[in-house]
Image (cartoon, grey):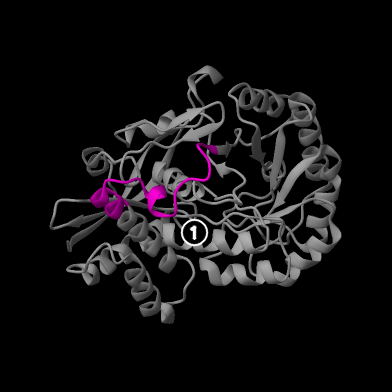
């Protein structure tokens, strides 16, 4: 079997932010980046690249995948490890962060999909087999703006059966000029509103639900420390990305002076950038993104590294259905798994892309025995909504 083509798409479509039972539809335009790898035996694989960096990054990733595809034509798609290293090492002069690992991720996921389909086995069966029968999820409410609505949104998540959710009660108080980190500070009013929102949400959902707080790397060291400790009395399960990702020293200062667990990793690329996290005890949880950090191959390696340090792993997800399913395929085989992130508790919005809706029941995702990823994308829909 040989690779005959690698095709990327950047598509743009309306995305429904709220399920139908939450009142009027709240549509927003979203971009997704998908990858298809074709072979001479008619077996095709699907991959995805995270769209979280935004429109410019989507175009860069699309170009990288297209150019890398020309290099891969004629190669055996089942030689996944060789292809991963070939791409990674050939691009090191461009840097191993960002577009490089994003492109690798999309291709790697597609190659695992091909391998599974060629062997008529789901990917998790090829990674050592399952250690659980379902994937626990955590999800997001709409961005909290004030306590009353935030509490109502949180109660809907709990009613859906989810046992954990993540929110950023600070975000609405920060500048929205496209650069979130400027001085790393938040106003006294914004800080107090974050406390009020978190307190209201905790009261609404009770003590058993895990509340995760995402700081999005927006704060300097003293601000992050102050916020984490102010929110600590409300039993938050973790405080995520307290400072920008570039400084391990800043992260260590926060880690040493807060009373809540720390989670990092969505903006770390490959196992190599996780080494300082583990060696210096900088996080209680890690959260690599399978569509960003290097694909299924790399997510499995990072999970095994984390296992050796007894650190739970909880893959990040900011994109589409393959992001969710690819991460879940790996986590089925990982003993030190915490929960898998999803954008909303109702992922019916993904149905327009895929041939099989995601099977989510009471806050858990169930994978099937269908081969590869277990889902395929609708190519006609992608073509109809492609902007690149």
Judge whether residue 300 is colored magenta: no
Mark 1 Cα shell of 10 Å, populated few (<14), some (14-19), many (≥20): many
Q: Is residue 293 visible?
A: no
Depth order, front residue of 123/316 = 123
Specify whether 26 is left or right of 146. Answer: left
Residue underneath mark 1: 300
Depicted 272 relative to depicted 328: above or below: below
The quadrant the N terminus occupies is bottom left
Residue at point 27% right, 42% down?
382
The picture places residue 72, in percent across and down from the top left corner, at 24, 69
Mark count: 1
Specify whether 51 is left or right of 372. Answer: right
Specify whether 98 is left or right of 197. Answer: left
Badge 1 marks a residue whose secondary structure is helix
Q: Is residue 21 visible?
A: yes
Depth order, front residue of 111/320 = 111
The picture places residue 107, in percent across and down from the top left corner, at 33, 60
The picture places residue 159, in percent across and down from the top left corner, at 62, 21
Q: Which residues are magenta?
A: 113-135
Residue at point 54% right, 51% down?
334
Residue at point 61% right, 27% down?
157
The picture places residue 156, in percent across and down from the top left corner, at 62, 23
């Amino acid at each position: 079997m040989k690779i005959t083509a690698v095709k990327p798409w950047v598509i743009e479509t309306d995305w429904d932010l709220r399920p139908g039972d939450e009142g009027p539809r709240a549509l927003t335009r979203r971009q997704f980046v998908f990858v298809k790898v074709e072979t001479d035996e008619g077996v095709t694989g699907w991959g995805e690249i995270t769209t979280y960096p935004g429109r410019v990054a989507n175009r860069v990733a699309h170009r990288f995948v297209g150019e890398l595809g020309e290099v891969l034509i004629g190669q055996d798609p089942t030689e996944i490890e060789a292809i991963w290293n070939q791409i990674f090492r050939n691009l090191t002069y461009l840097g191993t962060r960002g577009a490089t690992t994003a492109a690798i991720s999309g291709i790697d996921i597609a190659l695992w999909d091909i391998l599974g389909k060629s062997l008529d086995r789901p990917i998790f069966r090829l990674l050592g087999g399952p250690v659980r029968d379902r994937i626990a999820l955590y999800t997001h409410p709409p961005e909290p703006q004030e306590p009353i609505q935030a509490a109502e949104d949180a109660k809907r998540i709990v009613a859906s059966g989810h046992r954990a959710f993540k929110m950023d009660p600070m975000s609405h108080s920060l500048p929205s000029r496209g650069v979130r980190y400027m001085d790393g500070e938040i106003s006294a009013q914004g800080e107090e509103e974050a406390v009020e929102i978190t307190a209201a949400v905790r009261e609404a959902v009770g003590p058993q639900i895990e509340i995760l707080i995402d700081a999005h790397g927006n704060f300097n060291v003293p601000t992050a420390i102050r916020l984490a400790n102010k929110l600590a009395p409300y039993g938050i399960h973790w405080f995520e990305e307290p400072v920008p990702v570039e400084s391990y020293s800043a992260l260590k200062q926060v880690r040493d002076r807060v009373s809540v667990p720390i989670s990092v990793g969505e903006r770390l690329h490959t196992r190599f950038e996780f080494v300082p996290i583990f060696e210096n005890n900088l996080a209680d949880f890690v959260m690599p993104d399978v569509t960003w950090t290097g694909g299924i191959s790399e997510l499995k390696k990072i999970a095994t590294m984390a296992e050796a340090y007894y650190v739970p792993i909880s893959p990040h997800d900011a994109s589409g259905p393959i992001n969710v399913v690819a991460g879940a395929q790996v986590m089925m085989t990982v003993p030190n798994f915490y929960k898998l992130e999803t954008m909303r508790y109702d992922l019916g919005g993904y149905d327009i892309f895929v041939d099989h809706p995601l099977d989510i029941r009471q806050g858990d995702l169930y994978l099937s025995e269908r081969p590869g990823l277990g889902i395929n994308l609708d190519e006609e829909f992608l073509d109809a909504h492609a902007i690149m």
